[in-house]
Amino acid sequence: MALREVLPEQHFTRPPPRFNDATIVKSLEELGIGRPSTYASIISLLQHDCETGRSYKATSLGRVLSDMAYTES
């Protein structure tokens, strides 16, 4: 099979979007974790990203809990 033509194209990948309040609550509901009354305390385990003012990242405690949840399931 011979190569006929090469077209130079550049493609960029994007990282998955970060969580915000709505996506965290939606994920908790889909996974059956917590109740509406406990969502605030669950979200408090996350640290607000001050650079964007909108997204969250896990605190060290949140990462430990996440690791425990994934290894037990």
Image: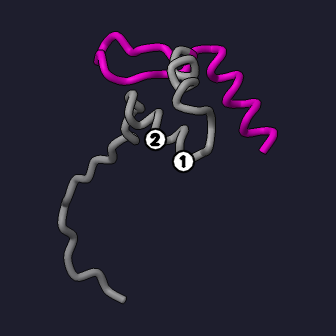
Crowd around label 2: few <14 · some 14–19 · many ≥20 (10 Å): few
Identify the amino acid type marked 1.
Glu
Q: Is residue 8 left or right of residue 28?
A: left
Q: Was residue 44 drawn as part of the magenta stretch in this picture?
A: no
- Residue reaching furthest to the bottom: 1
Q: Position of residue 33 (x, y in %)?
A: 62, 37
Residue 10 horizontal side relative to residue 28, left or right = left
Q: Position of residue 8 (x, y in %)?
A: 19, 60
Residue bearing mark 2: 26
Of the pair 40 and 71, the residue shown nearer to us: 40
- The answer to whether the residues at label 1 and label 2 have Cβ atoms under 8 Å apart is yes
Residue beneath the point at 33% across and 43% down: 14
For the view shown, which residue lies furthest in the front direction? 37
Circle 2 SS class = helix
- Quarter of the picture containing the C terminus is top right
The extreme right residue here reads 72
Tell me where the magenta segment starts and ends, as one range: 45-73
Seen from the viewer's position, the closer of residues 50 and 27 is 27
Report the disc number at residue 41.
none
Question: Which image quadrant: the N terminus?
Answer: bottom left
- Circle 1: element type: helix
Residue 63 on the magenta span: yes
At which x and y percent is residue 49?
39, 15
Q: In the drawing, does residue 36 fall left or right of residue 4?
A: right
Residue that mark 1 sits on: 30
**Residue located at (34% from left, 10% from top):** 50
Q: How is the structure coloured here? A: one colour
- When asked about the image quadrant of residue 53, the answer is top left
The quadrant in which residue 52 appears is: top left
Graded by Cα atoms within 10 Å as few (under 14), some (14 to 19) or many (20 or more), the crowding at tag 1 reads: few
- Residue 67 lies, in percent from the top left, at 71, 30
Q: Residue at x 54, y 21 (%)?
A: 58
